[in-house]
Image (cartoon, rainbow, N blue to C red):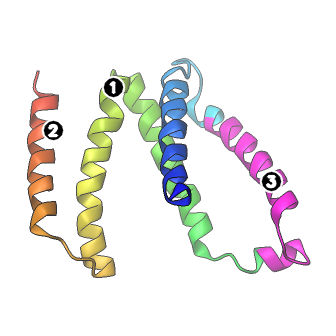
Amino acid sequence: MFNYIWPIGMIVLSNIVYNITTKQTPNHANAFLSLSVTYGVAMISTFVVFLFTHKENSIQASFSKLNWTSFVLGIAIIGLELGYIFAFRNGWQVNMTSLVANIILAISLLFVGFLLYKEKISLTQLAGIALCLGGLVLILKK
């Protein structure tokens, strides 16, 4: 059970730290330079962990197992980071930004799962979508 739960805990804790630090990114700092430093730290950190944990005979063997997804994920992460930085700079509150984005994301992914992966959408999920949309209306109401 622990192996099932700990990744969610990591996601939640990391998202809390992520939102706090992104909100604290100085408005006068160049967002692209800030992300360059961020990804430099991430690249060095993950590569060091890789060196201690890889099981292949060579680094080249590990690289040969990669495909296009690593590159597209890198671009998608830049979009995520810039979206949050600019949302915060444009006045979105920490307690609303992630909530609104993740509700819209969850609804969108239900349909992505259905269209791309042939996952079923149940009546319960459709009811959940309706509740989420209603919640968005209430949350965003001024």
Chain part drawn in magenta? 35-62
The answer to if 40 sits in the magenta stretch is yes
Q: Secondary structure at mark 3?
A: helix
- Identify the residue at horizontal 48%, vertical 30% (top origin): 19
Which kind of residue does numbered mark 3 sit on?
Val
Q: Secondary structure at mark 2?
A: helix
Q: Is residue 71 left or right of residue 5?
A: right
Q: How many other residues sit within 10 Å of disc 3, few (<14), some (14-19) or many (≥20)?
A: few
Q: Where is mark 2, residue-wise?
A: 136
Q: Nearer the viewer, mark 3 or mark 2?
A: 3
- Identify the residue at horizontal 50%, vertical 25% (top origin): 20
Residue extending farthest right: 57
In the depicted structure, whether residue 119 falls above or below residue 35 = below
- Identify the residue at horizontal 68%, vertical 75% (top origin): 66
Determine the main secondary structure of the stretch shown in magenta: helix
Q: Where is mark 1, residue-wise?
A: 95
Q: Where is mark 3, residue-wise?
A: 49
**Quadrant location of the C terminus in the rendered image:** top left
